[in-house]
Image (cartoon, coloured by chain):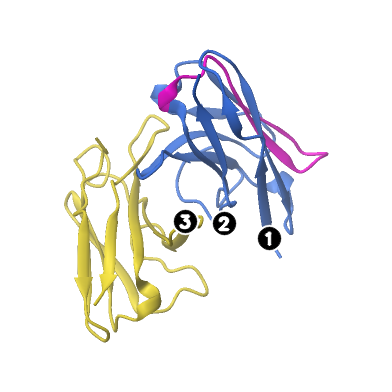
Chain colours: A yellow, B blue
Amino acid sequence: QSALTQPPSASGSPGQSVTISCTGTSNDIGVYNFVSWYQQHPGKAPKLMIYEVTKRPSGVPDRFSASKSGNTASLTVSGLQAEDEGDYYCSSYAGRSNLVFGGGTKLTVL
Amino acid sequence: QVQLVESGGGVVQPGTSVRLSCAVSGFSFRNYGMHWVRQAPGRGLQWVAGTSHDGGDKEYADFVQGRFTISRDNSKDTVYLDMNSLRSDDSAVYYCARAPSSGSFPNWFDPWGQGTLVTVSS
């Protein structure tokens, strides 16, 4: 059982927007602004998409955005494209030198 | 071009040990903290351990319980994960990943290596 809770699946048609939630507690997401999001394609390494709640690394399209409210973080993918299909994982610092991940959300582009 | 290449995985028997290596290139290794993250087959990601840029600070996930040791050799641009008393639930792809700064603080990681598979089975 993962420390952060994500929906197992999400989907949308090309061009649409989809939001993936990541729910933690007041011991992780609720207190630290160290939430990150990763994209993983089958058989590949995870790729950083968002760090420190809302920041996008260079090279990540601005179609990817994120936010946090209380104990829940969210990743929004706008203008869905076929290459956005994959697994998405959130993570958060949880204090005492511990990092926790969500269970992952499989995003399907219909 | 930044590259992280893991090695050392394979099939090992329960109770035995294995050393994973992660050789990096394309950036100044000695300036960055490094971490190991694992992913059991079909499962999610799990942070394992991290080391500061000089190896002076090390952090471990609670489940490690003294069985794993992270280390680094800055003269070889390589980070290691020594795993002892292996159990079947340690079976996973083990990724090394670069931290955003010099410390061992587990925050976010970029980039990641391609991973090395460890299968613990008799």
Could you say which quadrant of the image residue A73 lies in?
Answer: bottom left
Q: Name the residue type under label 1.
A: Val
Task: Check if mark 1's residue and mark 2's residue have beta carbons within 8 Å.
Answer: yes
Question: Residue pushed farthest front?
Answer: B122
Residue under label 1, please give it. B2
Residue under label 2, please give it. B111
SS for callout 1 = loop
Q: Does the magenta-highlighted stretch encompass residue B83?
A: yes
> In this picture, is A43 found above or below A17?
above
Residue under label 3, please give it. A46
Whether marks 1 and 2 lie on the same chain: yes
> In this picture, is A107 found above or below B83?
below
Q: Does the magenta-highlighted stretch encompass residue B94?
A: no
Could you tell me residue A79's position as x and y percent? 29, 84
Could you tell me residue B64's position as x and y percent? 45, 22
Along the line of sight, the residue nearer the viewer: A42 or B56: A42
Q: Name the residue type under label 2.
A: Pro
The span picked out in magenta is B70-89
Along the line of sight, the residue nearer the viewer: B11 or A12: B11
Which chain does the residue under circle 1 lie in? B
> In this picture, is A43 found above or below A94?
below
Inspect this view and state whether residue A21 appears: no
Q: Which mark is residue B12?
A: none
SS for callout 3 = loop
Which chain does the residue under circle 2 lie in? B
Along the line of sight, the residue nearer the viewer: B52 or B14: B14
Could you tell me residue B58's position as x and y percent? 56, 28
